[in-house]
Amino acid sequence: MRIRLAGLIPESYVDGPGIRFTIFVQGCPHNCEGCHNPETHDFEGGRLADTDRIYNKIKQFPLSKGVTFSGGEPFCQAEPLAELAEKLKADGYHLMSYSGWTYEQLVKKGETEPFVKKLLGLLDVLVDGRFVLAERTLELHFRGSRNQRLIDVPKSLGSGKAITIEL
């Protein structure tokens, strides 16, 4: 399946716990002031790639035990990411995603957008919420601003409410 990418980082230490393969998708509707990746906002930018090729590339990096979806806005490309996530989950990868939408907004979107629901259901951790420049911090792991939360997705989906964690 085709996906629009901004870039790939095979062995990242900053996009989640442990050594991770990070996929930066292209396109974001949020346009947060002070965004770390403003070049990923244009939905026509980046390049087209094939999810099977990305999967095969990930498998070439055995030190990466997790995969992080970043961007851009990953949930704007929920269908190809859900397809990729399903394969990765079956292989035992820890899956994490960033989103400018909150967990609650994604659950609501999932009611009418099946691939949003599917992708959310395959994640272990979600970093949710828009980046807010006034709340910027370098003190929190894996987050850019204090309003963003680390969500334990399986526990949250099981309980019907967002459950935060620290990594």
Image (cartoon, helix red, strand yellow):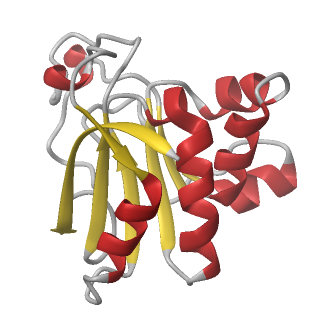
Query: Is residue 92 positioned above or below 101 on the image?
Result: below
Spot occupied by residue 47 in the image (x, y as percentages of width and height): 24, 34
Spot occupied by residue 104 in the image (x, y as percentages of width and height): 69, 29
Residue located 76% across and 26% down the image: 113
Could you tell whether 34 is left or right of 96 in the image? left
Query: Is residue 142 positioned above or below 10 on the image?
Result: above
Q: Number of numbered discs present? A: 0
Could you tell whether 2 is left or right of 155 in the image? left
From this viewpoint, is residue 23 visible? yes
Query: Is residue 114 positioned above or below 19 on the image?
Result: above
Residue 9 in which image quadrant: bottom left
Residue 167 in which image quadrant: bottom left
Q: Residue furthest bottom?
A: 62
Residue 127 in which image quadrant: top left
Residue located 29% across and 18% down the image: 132
Residue located 53% across and 47% down the image: 1
Could you tell whether 84 is left or right of 127 in the image? right
In the image, 36 versus 93, the foreground residue is: 93
Residue located 68% across and 35% down the image: 116
